[in-house]
Amino acid sequence: MADSDKAHTAESAQRKPMTAPMVAARKGAAKLKMITAYDAPTARIADRAGADIILVGDSVANVVLGHGDTLAVSVDVMVHHTAAVTRTKPKALVVGDMPWLSYHSSTEDTVANAGQLVREGGAGAVKLEGGRKRLPMVTAVLDAEIPVMGHLGLTPQSVHSMGGYKVQGKEAQAAYELISDAHALADAGVFAIVLEGVPDVVAEIVTNELSIPTIGIGAGVHCDGQVLVFHDVTGLGAGEYLPKFVRQYANLADDAVAAIAEFFADVESGAFPSDAETYHMPAESAEILRNLSDPSAHFLADEAMERSP
Ligand code: KIV
């Protein structure tokens, strides 16, 4: 194990596993750090970096699976990715995103789908998009003892009804509706709300008025925490369009291209693999094997076999 991994394992053992009530209790205290992850390696990296919350976002559709929007993923796909994340046993709270149409038709279906993310995916909470329109579903999931994170503003599952990915709540009336939605979700009992793509003043008012944390993405600095997509922060998106609210802290795609190109160059030159990267047989066994593989030895052995009675 590398020294950095050992240090992390020791440090991680000290951290208490994060729960939804612990996230709610962080209101007004240290800022909440949330990032998406979609599989075991990204979950391990996010947890090592000290994430409070790992969101298995339905952005897996565009970020990892190559779809044009988030509408393409089903509950089964979300369970598959959520389970990959929770198998790494992160200290962060794992929130499973409820995909489009998994909480739109009936409260019974909604609870069953949220339950799948918890029972099969291992999530500690679920997130769903929308405000008062979704209150019966939110309440039903909470009644099933599953913590719910809300999501308001630019909700990507509404891309068609919004007419594109547009900042929401820019007009006073729309902003007022959004603030009313936030109050309704908080009153229903959600433990936190993601505010996406809204003017900073709207996020500031919501954050000041609610007693639960807000977590912003493209919502300014006043929120109780911030979330970004793993591949955007690390530059793994490999040339994908980045919205203005993204800050890219590394360019792992370029680093990966350089590493793989170096590997290929070593393959071409014969510099890979080296002796140290090769398995060896004891010298005597190798000698016997070489003699057996000698074509003339085969011939003599075959002849002897033919002559024997
Ligand atoms: O799916 C997602 O990634 C999200 C965000 C809040 C980043 O919902």
Image (cartoon, rainbow, N blue to C red):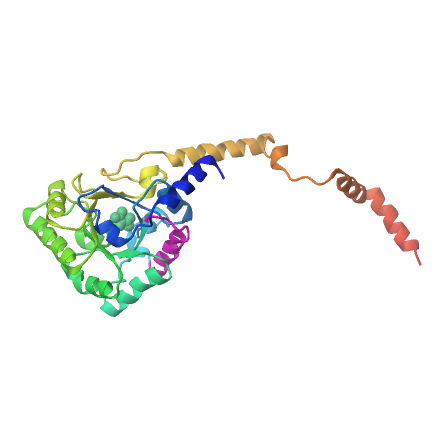
Is residue 39 positioned above or below 246 on the image?
below
Q: Is residue 42 visible?
A: no
Q: Residue at x 38, y 47 (%)?
A: 43
Q: Is residue 264 visible?
A: yes
Q: Residue at x 25, y 58 (%)?
A: 147
Residue at the far front: name it: 14
| Residue 160 part of the magenta-drawn span | no
Q: For the magenta stretch, what is the residue range?
A: 74-92
Q: Is 305 left or right of 86, judged from the image as shown?
A: right
**Can you tell which quarter of the image residue 231 is in?**
top left
| Residue 87 part of the magenta-drawn span | yes
**Can you tell which quarter of the image residue 296 is in?**
top right
Majority secondary structure in the magenta region: helix
- Residue 85: x and y, percent? 38, 51
- Residue 19: x and y, percent? 29, 53
**Quadrant that contains the C terminus:** bottom right
- Residue 105: x and y, percent? 23, 67
Number of numbered labels in the structure image:
0
**Can you tell which quarter of the image residue 82 is in?**
bottom left
